[in-house]
Amino acid sequence: MKNYLPFEKPVSELEKKIEELEQESVSKQIDLSSSLEGLKQELSEEIKLIYSHLTSWETVLIARHPERPKLIDYIRYLIPDYVYFCGDRHYMDDNAIFSAIGTFQGKPIMVIGHNKGKDTKENILNNFGMANPEGYRKAIRLMRLAEKFNCPVVLMVDTQGAYPGIAAEEHGQSEAIAYNLREMFRIQVPILVIVTGEGGSGGALGIGIGDKILMLEYAIYSVISPESCSNILYRDTSRASQFAEKLHITSKDLMQFGLIDGILPEPLGGAHRDHKTMLETVKKEIQYFLDEQTPLNKKTRLDRRMEKFLKMASYETSLNLYQSSS
């Protein structure tokens, strides 16, 4: 059974009609192709209409859709011969961060990302993709390993945020994220960051520094979730939809502000409706990135990476951001 979002009711009704007609056509041996074709055309137009007028809150719901491609889907498609790495070599392995190396287009590549899981059991096992300090320490350890073997790194972000539990704080959650932020500026191999779903706060930034930052069309990226923002300011999460607009968290917002480098278009109706097309889009973008980065020497790459993020924090950039959001 498909998971329909609240604003997709017209879509669910049309798809139900199509399914009923298809069943009737088979059971009664009747040719209903013309009727089906008309309904499918109507469905396509309805989806286009809905997805061309999304609010920020509706985009949040799409970014969190349980049927969106997960990290393991991307890894299996991009590097089917992958080898899984685990452990931070300090304390434990964190299932919320999944890391693998494999062959992409005949060359080695390291893929590291948040691992939410594909069902309830995996969600719980992986802590819903909310990493502990051990996860971020594992990530930077493997980035250094990739650097040692001159292997490009792809970082895939999809988390509500770093795990806020007491144990995580006791083990140095903020230090682990801050350490990664510093060290990722020093990793000499190409680093591509792709926000595939939720890019939540420091949990996203912990593996979010790279030479190029991309977002899927209906992904979100924010310093705080709309619910948390609403709760902190008003002790009421019911205003989350309002804060989704004010936080400017959609890919279009971030592209406008110059905080990301590109938007990867999603299939009609979102990535959750067509995994294969989305996976192929990501594959092509990774190849384009590698072709772009390969000619650069290490010093030029690191200088550009640093310049990119320093520009985001400049007074002029901050002023422009403030004026455009006012």
Image (tube, helix red, strand yellow):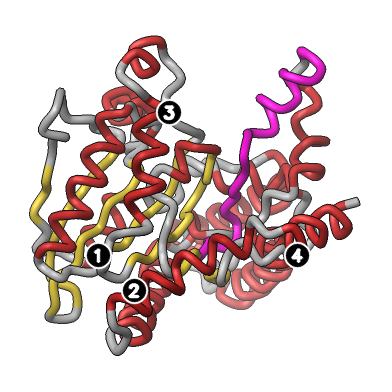
Identify the mark at residue 52; answer none if there is no mark. 4
- 238 within the magenta span: no
Q: Is residue 189 left or right of residue 127?
A: left
Q: Is residue 6 left or right of residue 73?
A: right
Mark 3 and mark 4 lie on one chain; the one further toward the N terminus is 4
Report how far apart the C-alphas of labels 1 and 3 lie in the structure.
33 Å
Pointer 4 and pointer 1: residues touching (CB < 8 Å)?
Answer: no
* Element carrying mark 2: helix
Pointer 1 and pointer 2: residues touching (CB < 8 Å)?
Answer: yes
Q: Classify 10 Å Cα crowding around label 3: few (below 14), some (14-19), many (20 and above).
A: some
Identify the mark at residue 77; answer none if there is no mark. 1
User: Mark 1 against mark 3, which lies toward the viewer?
Assistant: 3
Q: Which residues are magenta?
A: 214-235
Residue type at numbered disc 2: Lys
Report how far apart the C-alphas of labels 1 and 2 lie in the structure.
8 Å
Report how far apart the C-alphas of labels 3 and 2 lie in the structure.
32 Å
Pointer 1 and pointer 3: residues touching (CB < 8 Å)?
Answer: no
Q: Classify 10 Å Cα crowding around label 4: few (below 14), some (14-19), many (20 and above).
A: few
Mark 1 and mark 2 lie on one chain; the one further toward the N terminus is 1
